[in-house]
Image (cartoon, rainbow, N blue to C red):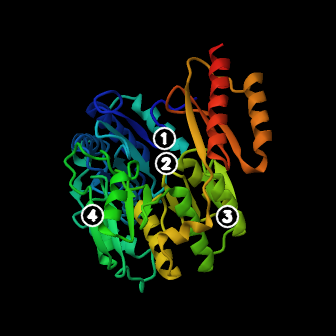
Amino acid sequence: MGKRYFGTDGIRGRVGERPITAEFMLKLGWAVGRALQSKGFNRIVIGKDTRISGYMFESALEAGLSAAGVNIALLGPMPTPAIAYLTRTLRACAGIVVSASHNPYYDNGIKFFSRDGQKLPDDTEERIEDLLERPFETVGPDALGKAERIVDAAGRYIEFCKSTVPSWTSFSSLKIVLDCAHGATYHIAPSVFGEMGASVIPISVSPDGLNINQDCGSTKPENLRETVLQQGADLGIAFDGDGDRVIMVDHRGDILDGDELMFIIARDRLRTGSRFNAVVGTLMTNLGLEIALRALGLDLHRAKVGDRYVMERLLAEKLILGGENSGHIICLDRTSTGDGIISALQVVTAMLQSGKSLHDLKAGMTKYPQVLINVSVTGEVDLQRPPIQDAIKAMESQLGEHGRVLLRSSGTEPVVRVMVEGPDAGAVERQARELAGVVRETLSA
């Protein structure tokens, strides 16, 4: 059976609409406490991003956990990967993040980390959902959980981030613009890069609870691009609201997505002697990355879309680097989850040690034009119908080894995603529209 509340990245939705309500979060905290506490591990950490509803949900979760007899460590506003790190170092039985990542302020959600700082396995999520259907029972008054605030949480994480690059590395020659999306990195990223020696120009670092991700951050890097050019900066770095994604801008204003950043990190890892034979991407990873990696002697392994599936593939194949073009990059040789700040540190270090600009570093990879069209659908979707499959085969024959065609049903909305990728932007645009038309006509019939 499918899970009722959990998606590929926790539980998410609009604030005030079930399950994103204070009432549900109270019960969720209790269920998580019941499911995850174990002998010797009776503390759960809670962190959040900067959206206004975080206050409400943090309190509700705290009450539910206490009712289950679990102690709580409150971290306050912290990037999602910081909660993963502190879950491990504080020897907690789990970590909870109150965040809707790159979504607007009126959405919120809950993410979870296991004791080792990774996503919860499916059977644990199913156990939590089972407990949500049971009556709420409070432990005895003498067994209630206690709460404490970890006042040095930010400092602990800042030092950890800096430890992921060689201790002799200095960014003193660089002017860097940081766009923190008015989110959870607003008080972390400027300190990390400033303490590394960089001249830091911070933007979008004034959260008011409502402006998180608003016309800023990794999903909207235009303001970052303009600031880099205006300030004559060496590069710009944009995070999303909870800090697990990163997009960068070079000194000429060109935007680098997650695929290009993974290429730079992979090539630098090979230069420093890391032993690995593949990088994990997704079905949406640009063909240009696959070709560039092949030139380095590396394979690209494609997982389903979603950082959860990238992580599963990394662990199964004992690899160290993977991610998505959205900027969610996982450096498993540095940390246990996708981390925007740590990924950016790896790229900047590669710049300094190579003596090249960010613009020159990305030159080893050429992105292929990629067009994505969403086709609205209703009812059951059968993408195996002959007209659709015939159109795909014909298009793949035209593209040969120099392009890709991908159709997939969205897991979050009633659409079929039609993607065509190839060397000629105009041809790709025409082919994508043609295939989207076939899909629309066939499914409506």
Q: Residues within 10 Å of mark 2 (few under 14, many from 20)?
A: some
Residue type at the position of mark 3: Leu
Residue type at the position of mark 1: Glu
Q: CA distance from mark 3 to mark 4?
A: 33 Å
Q: Quadrant of residue 367?
A: bottom right
201 lies left or right of 36? left
* Residue position marked by numbered label 2 in the rendering: 120
Which tag, 1 or 2, sits closer to the chain's start? 2
Q: CA distance from mark 3 to mark 1?
A: 35 Å
Q: Nearer the viewer, mark 1 or mark 4?
A: 4
148 lies left or right of 415? left
Q: Position of residue 436 (x, y in %)?
A: 63, 28
Q: Nearer the viewer, residue 159 or 150?
A: 159
* Residue position marked by numbered label 4 in the rendering: 202
Which tag, 3 or 2, sits closer to the chain's start? 2
Q: Secondary structure at mark 3?
A: helix
Which tag, 1 or 4, sits closer to the chain's start? 1
Residue type at the position of mark 2: Leu
Q: Is residue 420 above or below residue 438?
A: below
Q: CA distance from mark 2 to mark 4?
A: 34 Å
Question: Quick check: marks 1 and 2 in contact, CB under 8 Å?
Answer: yes
* Residue position marked by numbered label 1 in the rendering: 125
Q: Secondary structure at mark 4?
A: strand
Q: Which mark is residue 293?
A: 3
